[in-house]
Image (cartoon, rainbow, N blue to C red):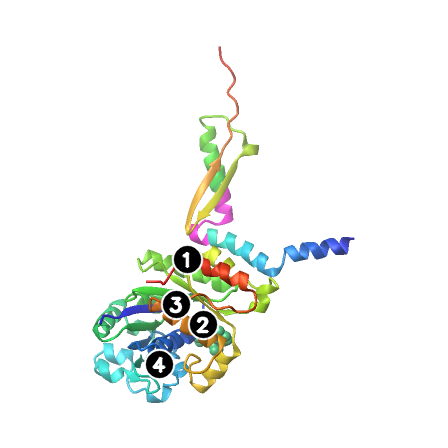
Amino acid sequence: MTASVITFTSGKGGVGKTTTTANVAVALALLGKKVVCIDGDIGLRNLDLVLGLENRIVYDVVDVVEGRCRLRQAMIRDKRLPELYLIPAAQTRDKNALSPSDMVRLCDELRPEFDFICIDSPAGIERGFRNAIAPADQVVVVTNPEVSAVRDADRVVGLVEAEEKGPARLILNRVNPAMVKRNEMLSPEDVLELLAIDLLGIVPEDENVIISTNRGQPIALNGKTRAGEAFHNIARRLNGENVPLMKLDDRQDFFSKLARMMRSGGS
Amino acid sequence: MAGWLDWLMGQRNKSADQAKERLKLVLINDRTDLSPAQMEQLKNDLLAVIERYIAIDPARVHITMSQEGREHRLLADIPLKPAPRKR
Ligand SMILES: Nc1ncnc2c1ncn2[C@@H]1O[C@H](COP(=O)(O)OP(=O)(O)OP(=O)(O)O)[C@@H](O)[C@H]1O
Ligand SMILES: [Mg+2]
């Protein structure tokens, strides 16, 4: 086994990186994959909370790197799933407590034992972002259909290319189909044309995301919600399956056109 | 009449279209690290250099940025003034 390291990043804050990392990791684990998530947001840890594992933290990633515990001791197993683990961020340290080479070394140690390593990047383009992309085999840029988020995503796509970690793929989160229909929100086609990168998935705006996050039960864990289904589709694409885009509303034409823009399968 | 025309223009100019147009321009500036003012300066400098050698027709010059994927190129269409015939 040698894991594929996937980093979720965005430039702009608050677009849904942590939500996406948590749910894609859960969905991959539900596919029977062995998955570990690393919270790369040192000082502002949240992946534990979104996964509902906040009460189980003893050690964190900085403890591992600074030798205060063994890697195993910092890995929290999610008991709801066969093989999902979390390595939490340190909450009382800052991004300089880790270096890109620390992250590379950490992932190299994890690689032989896992199918997927999912890294939740902090917002921004500084040290925390560089730490998060350093070990990546694939970079996924998360954005919203909104001018500042798209602009920042473009900047990050360029930086990922410059670091020779490209080409990044896109997840467009919080799409509101009714607004797209009224032409008051950038459509997925518009965003793809502007950014000129491949699409990995579209996640609709869905109030169930907030409800499930309130409960510490990632939306991909249970039941049929639109956002949950979108995260499952993304996980299957990351796993190499060719999954068509789901219909966000009755406008079949629009989304089948988009489906043709998708590259088959993914790497 | 005017109200109807305004309505028609409004349909063409919904906020998503404005967002897209504005982003197109700003992304070119961001990717090339050239502000619109610097771009203007570049055009002027370019024409000044060419004019040192040949006469051009400044009114019909077109310098634009084209995009293919994430790659950009500067396209210059610079019509020349016919040279005065010498015998
Ligand atoms: N598809 C969605 N529908 C509705 N709400 C969403 C969706 N995706 C994310 N959210 C909400 O948006 C907020 C921000 O999400 P999240 O914390 O995942 O963003 P982030 O990019 O990790 O932020 P930061 O940059 O601060 O780390 C959260 O309240 C989350 O519940
Ligand atoms: Mg986050």
- For label 4, the crowd category at 10 Å Cα-Cα, with few meaning under 14, some 14 to 19 and many 20 or more, is some
Q: Secondary structure at mark 1?
A: loop
Query: Does label 4 or label 2 sit earlier along the sequence?
Result: 4
Residue A91: assigned label: 4
- Residue pointed to by mark 2: A230
Do we see residue A122 in this rendering? no
Mark 1 falls within which chain? A
Name the residue type under label 2: Ala
Residue B32 highlighted magenta (yes or no): yes
Same chain assignment for discs 2 and 3: yes
Residue A265 highlighted magenta (yes or no): no
Residue B76, placed above or below residue A244 = above
The residues bearing labels 4 and 3 have C-alpha atoms spaced at a distance of 19 Å
Residue A232, placed above or below residue B25 = below
Name the residue type under label 4: Gln
Decide which of B70, A45 is in the foreground and name it.
Answer: B70
Residue A197: assigned label: 1
Same chain assignment for discs 4 and 2: yes
Image coords of residue A38 (percent x, y): 32, 76
- Is the residue indicated by label 4 positioned so its CB lies within 8 Å of ligand 2? no
Residue A103: assigned label: none
* Front: mark 4 or 2: 2
Query: Does label 1 or label 4 sit earlier along the sequence?
Result: 4
- For label 3, the crowd category at 10 Å Cα-Cα, with few meaning under 14, some 14 to 19 and many 20 or more, is many
